[in-house]
Image: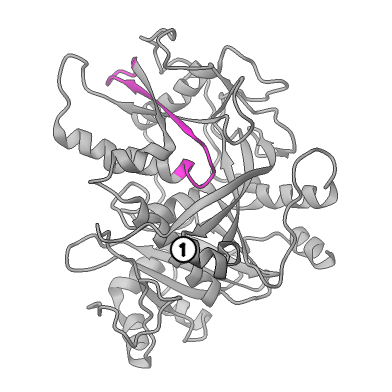
Amino acid sequence: MDEAEPGPDSESSGGGPWQLVSSKKEKRKARRDESLAQPMAAARGARPQARDEASGGDEYRDLQVPKPSLSISNTHSFRNHSVIGHYSQVRNGDVFMDKREACHCKTVPDDGSTSLEWDLNRGFEEFEWRDRLNTKADGLKPVLKWILHKLDNPGEDALKQYPRPNAEAVTFVVQRAVMTRILTAPYPTRESTGGWRLRVCRFQNTIYLCNDKTFGPWRNLTPAQKAKTYRRYGFERYLTSHIQPVDSSSYKYSEAAGYVTVVLTQLVPEQSEESKRTEPSASKARLFVLAAGVDGELDGLESPPRNYVELKTITCYDKHQPEPKEYSQWFLANKLLRAWAQCYPVGIPRIVFGFHGDQGILTSISTFKTHELPGMCGDVWFEATSLNFADDFTKWLEKWIKETDPMREMYEVTFEPNFSSMRRSRMRLCRVEINDDHPSILTQDFVARMMKQ
């Protein structure tokens, strides 16, 4: 379907770059267009018409993702990061409100004192891979369990209390993986090239978002793919193995286990000094409760999240051979963009990369500061594009996601990428009924408890 450019009379989300397909003719055309309907139907094993029936025929919102532009100014930023809680998830999916799975990193891993030539394949044989059929950790379930625990035990530690529902301010509860997808959507990265789908609901003026793991084809990793994937865990074990976590049930021997921090942060518009006096930015800030896995903590530094560190690996060329320009561009456009999108919203200040050869032997370690990445990659991707996009996306959700019974209805947002020069990527929103194929993202005990609140 041809995509029209936004015009002065087109309805938009708060003046942002989104375009709403609003006429009845355009809606009918969008629903008939197999290029849009078929991938969605195939992903859930239903006829294309099923979505139209479930949504009542008029719940589609078809929106365009803006293309990156050098002329876009940075108008938003994530600020006021505050850790409000944490929990540990063990190998069988159970959640505990403590730090048993937290790991401590070597103080300065790239200070020259860390020995290299380490084999990142060590421990692969005994490593346990996540059971994708285990529903204990599906979606927001661990986060919801933490929220209930926090409401019942608000004074058990020095952490701030989870924000209560507010009739005037919308709070977004989201996993870090979802925020990473939103921030990288304008660019062709691993997160965006294949498309993705989110499940969304609005309950007590809080919007909950999680990934839809049923979207797209599922494939099991081959032994060779698992061996390459494991090297990231091998790098984490290498930098944290000098300190054994207390009462750890996995200590990086299980993909399913990990330590999760819960951070309260704001997406705040940048303002001039004059506008700050007449229109405080806090009135426009969007509040986010972000749940993010923490690879390691550095000792002797600032308090969380400033002492958190993100650990990553990448295959590099032989140290005696210069890296081709295409590889360097790929590193900037993919690895560093994704690392920034993961760490910046949470407030993680450091990203440690372990560079290894084709056989998984560690050759070098480098630390990158999260706030410096946009400047390093200024000719490849733009911080302003991602942040303005995140603001427009959340405005759009706030406008179109209505309060529903979370046990009966929810919404689905499908991202359909198109990075060609003539067309744009799209977002599609529709309302669906809760059933066995589309379970609620909230649990019954959570809804019942919040209703009593």
**Who is closer to the viewer here, 427 or 300?**
300
- Specify the quadrant of the image occupied by residue 195: bottom left
Name of the residue lying farthest toward the bottom: 24
- Specify the quadrant of the image occupied by residue 346: top right
Horizontal side of residue 322 vs 73, given as left or right = left
**Spot occupied by residue 109 in the image (x, y as percentages of width and height):** 46, 17
Query: What residue is shown with label 1?
Result: 391
- Asked if residue 437 can be seen in this view, the reply is no
Q: Identify which amino acid the numbered label 1 is placed on.
A: Asp
For residue 70, above or below residue 146: below
- Asked if residue 111 can be seen in this view, the reply is yes
**Spot occupied by residue 32 in the image (x, y as percentages of width and height):** 32, 82
**Spot occupied by residue 297 in the image (x, y as percentages of width and height):** 58, 26
Q: Residues within 10 Å of mark 1 (few under 14, many from 20)?
A: many
Horizontal side of residue 252 vs 448, given as left or right = left
Looking at the picture, the colour scheme in use is: one colour
165 within the magenta span: no
Report the label total.
1
- Start and end of the magenta stretch? 342-363
Residue at point 45% right, 58% down? 76
Rendered-image quadrant of the N terminus:
bottom left
Residue at point 56% right, 27% down? 296
**Spot occupied by residue 162 in the image (x, y as percentages of width and height):** 73, 52
